[in-house]
Amino acid sequence: MIPNTFDYQRATSLDEALGLVGTPGTKVIAGGMSLLPLMKLRLANPERLVDIGRLAELRGVRQLDDGRLAIGALTTYDELASSPAQHYGLIRDALPDIGDVQIRNRGTVGGAVAHCDPASDLPAVLLALDAEIVARSKRGEQVYAADGFFRGAFETALADDELITEIRLPGPRDDAGSAFLALSQRASGYSIVGVAVVVIKENGSAITQANIALTGVGDAPYRARAVEAALLGNEGTPESIAAAAAHATDGVTVAGDIHADSEYRAAMAITYTKRAIEAALGRLG
Amino acid sequence: MATDVQDVLGTSVKRVEDPRFITGQGRYVDDIKLTGMAHLAILRSPYAHANIRSVDTSRAKGMPGVLAVIVGADIPYNPLPMVWPAGGASGIQNNVSTPRVLATDSVKWTGEGVAAVVAETPEQAVDALEAIEVDYEPLPAVVDAEKATQPGAVQLHENAPNNVVFDWSVGDKDGTEKALAEAEVVVRERLVNHRLIPNPMEVRGDIGWYNPGTDEYTIWMSSQTPHIQRLLVGIFLMGIPEHKLRCIAPDVGGAFGTKIFCYADYALVLFASKLIGGGRPVKWIESRRESYGSTIHGRDHITYVEIAGKRDGEVTGVKVKTYANLGGRLSTIGPGIPTTLYARVLSGCYKIPNVYAEVTGVYTNTTFVDAYRGAGRPEATYVIERAMDLFANEIGMDKAELRRKNFIPKDAFPYDNPSGLGTAVNGEKIYVDSGDYEPAMDMALKTAGYADLEAKRAEAKSRGKLLGMGLSTYIEVCGVAPSKWIGAVGEGWGAAMWESSNIKVHLTGKIIVTMGTQPQGQGHETTYAQIISHELGVPMDDIVIQHSDTQGTPFGYGSYGSRTSSVGSTAAVKAADKIRDKARRYAAHMLEASYDDIEVEGAEYRVKGSPDKKKTLQEIAFALDLGFSLPVGMEPYLDETAYYDTPNCTWPFGTHIAIVEIDEDTGETELKRYIAVDDVGKKINPMIVDGQLHGGIAQGVGQALWETAIYGDDGQLLSGSMMDYALPRASWLPNFELDETVTPSPVNPLGVKGVGEAGCIASTAAVANAVNDALAPLGIKHLDMPFTAQTVWRAIQSAKGARA
Ligand SMILES: Cc1cc2nc3c(=O)[nH]c(=O)nc-3n(C[C@H](O)[C@H](O)[C@H](O)COP(=O)(O)OP(=O)(O)OC[C@H]3O[C@@H](n4cnc5c(N)ncnc54)[C@H](O)[C@@H]3O)c2cc1C
């Protein structure tokens, strides 16, 4: 449980950090909650760590003029919970069950997104919210849609020389109901299945938009398009929800491990999708 | 010193240890930093089963900071001692293979030590481990105890055909088979009591120091048994006699049994200190991951139980066959746990006339298994309590009524149970000392609302939940153990198990008590002080309890087996008796009265009928210490030692009830309520008793619902860290509803029994019975633990499939 020898450099400005990332053997460290355990197990052996943890410009949550919310990459889960982001039902649901107090005090939003653990909760939340991920490199700024960003286990669309600077959430709306529900793996607290749901009824009783994202199930968090499609124009009867939820793992190779084999995980993906849709619709009133 | 010192015995005084523990001022092995100290790291086998062709250390020796690289062949000692063979004296063959300090020819589990590096820093030692090249010849592995005994299974040791360590039995075979043959009803089931990984907060560690100036060795160790280790590590392993080895256990951050044993690293750090020379101490601290593979595991039984009886509920016989997984090689007392400590209490609190058990100890390519909190008794309780429920279901009788009908009646004590300690090989009998089981059960049933169970079930069902209630009417054996039993070769571990206490009343009247027992967080410094305060009338503040150092404490066997309060405390009471007696004799001299005329109240010694003629214990101690005026034949100083060998064990009992709810669609199981009525005899400190129960209950619930050590077929430990091994968290548990009955133990003067293990002995079975009760309406007869969501869901699915 002792990492290999490495060099350590604390970046004092974003520009300095951008000048250092991308060189071979270099890793950025934010809260260290994912990176340090890997280094202690010697599964990750970076030669140099660039600590971005004190870059004030990457911290904090602001409301943009157009109503969107911009979350600095270094914002911790704990800070997020007491920020305006708490008005998003999905974030309110998901945050308290991520890790433990220490993890929430140190773990950052940017770290969670960049790390892309197959069972990470926040990516599913961002997928369902249609969030944007803002990255910077010496080459300039790049904005990624959440959908498409999470490519595989520990694999994102981020280029080697890019840093995540900000996450942007669309403004909240009154005609949307949302919910995040998860079945957790008891030892780690990570989700065996986590489902983030946003349903919108623009006017009247039928669902006009459904964003459904799952984590823990495949090799990366994903949007369950078939479930979404099946819900459109639907009133949300128990039967129609169940029928839609049955598509929760369509096209996905469902993971299996000592805690949940693929058969159980697939069944829970469906059950939890159904329950999360019901909860989201319930909040819509 | 006033006579109006408040009597604190039996009150919930705050623990004197806690200020230092909870403010980070405890002193554990890793807090100790000695001048010139070097650091040791151990290279552990990545294979569960392999031959070692060669070990190349040349590159590692040249790494920065490396002082020495050690391989098995460098070490001149025998394999580690195993001191508790199963039934050895009765002619039962024990096919013993124990680990070497470092493996020489082969490895039998992932985690067995193969080589070690000593370096200037821990980081350098760990870095150099990676430069050691071991050429392994990997071999197929076997991890399941029952499969390991089958023909064609992988063989671990030449001296253990079919991987059998021993075949041991207890009880009346013919009588039990006859009872089964003649019974109206026989229920049979296969029960798996899965493997657990103990998780004390402080992992193990030690510092070895060889002093070339005196040719003496000192070891600081996170241990429950420093005195025993002086024998095992010193004499048995290294050939160092007692006067050349000092063992010190500083604050110990939990143990649960894991720190009873003789581990290879003890000898390794002492050997390494001498090897590198210059009188430099060598420290080794285990990592948590290392602990998971290299410190002992617990439980791991596969049991076939048959329970027989009449349709009216009278149980007439229990027959058991158990495969006990002991790991790749044997730990210090591995064979003793699934034999004496298990099968001898198999009939629990029931009067069952015929009991017979066969136990096969088995080698597999897994970490060695030894005593883990409860040690054999949770396994026995699980078997009998599950069997009682299975029997009740079969004959359609209420589970509480079945228990009531079969309880040992309260006028039957002392009770000699048919597989029990009373049938010990060497003829010495141990009885169940006392008990009155019905009141505890009735209290628990009332609190739990047992009478309304069916209404509760229906209400839960309307919410989509399956509700179940489970009983565990347990007994435990505390006060391990009378030397006549445990010391009997063939039944125990060949050593005695008495305890010791020394009390010194110093010049100023302050008291230092040294004990042979060894706390690991239980609060001994508080409870012993309460006892001495009560006995001698001295305030607790004037008393300090010391322990844990073979230089300066009387020899004792340490703390485990819920023995401290009954055996250790009695030694302390006896030492206090001697102090009081000498003080009284000296008071007679001071007051010019006869010994018989001196009456003692608290710390006051006065002449009967002349209450103003008196001396306090402080005055007596002062005069005795100065020794200016001593009666003929009396030695100066108030300093007395007592050794105490308990005549019998003590037997707490009680009823625990768990109420669970299961989500039918997901299998998620929630513990909704937990009710425990325990009878642990008289309590020295009720708050500490509650604390022991809380922790024990949580641990047992953890086994039933979450914790499990999982090995792959290749012998890799898949649940190898806390990210995969689910320890219970406070937020997953309801508030425990505790209550008591008090039946003082007749065995010792304080009437105490012990409580260290009761919680986990009872709770696993209570939860298992509750989950099975919840699943029974689906036609499920028995489901094995742990009741993870997936396991429960699958059982529900297949039950529904079978019925559809
Ligand atoms: C015990 C434990 C329990 C946990 N439980 C949960 C859980 O229940 N649910 C859950 O979702 N997560 C859980 N986590 C994961 C946790 O959410 C993440 O570890 C944390 O959010 C990562 O953020 P960090 O700042 O600590 O990242 P770090 O560990 O510092 O970095 C992680 C990775 O991201 C990269 N990185 C960090 N910041 C940036 C950036 N701004 N731009 C580009 N790359 C960057 C690093 O180079 C590294 O590769 C748990 C973790 C632990 C240790």
Image (spheres, coloured by chain):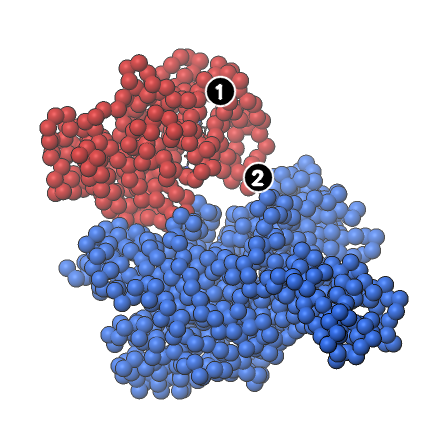
Chain colours: A red, B blue
Left or right position of A109 against B134 = left
Judging from the image, mark 1 belongs to the subunit labelled A
2 or 1: tag closer to the N-terminus? 2
Residue that appears at 68% across and 64% down? B3
User: Is residue A264 found left or right of B717 in the rendered image?
Assistant: left
**SS for dot 2:** loop
The secondary element bearing badge 1 is classed as loop
**Do the residues at discs 2 and 1 belong to one chain?**
yes
Q: For the N terminus of chain B, give its image quadrant.
A: bottom right
**Do we see residue B58 in this rendering?**
no
Q: Residue tagged by mark 1?
A: A55
B347 displayed left or right of B121: left
Give neighbour class at mark 2: few <14, some 14-19, many 20+ (Cα, 10 Å).
some
Give the residue type that dot 2 points to: Ile
The residue located at (28%, 55%) in the rendering is B662
Q: Is mark 2 within 8 Å of ligand 1?
A: no
Disc 1 residue type? Answer: Leu
Distance from mark 1 CB to nearest ligand 1 atom below 8 Å: no
Q: Quadrant of residue A163?
A: top left
Chain assignment, label 2: A
Q: Quadrant of the C terminus of chain B?
A: bottom left
Classify B534 as above or below A73: below
- Residue A2 numbered tag: 2
| Residue B404 pos. (x, y %) | 34, 76
> Toward the viewer: B418 or A80?
A80
On screen, residue B743 above or below B533: below
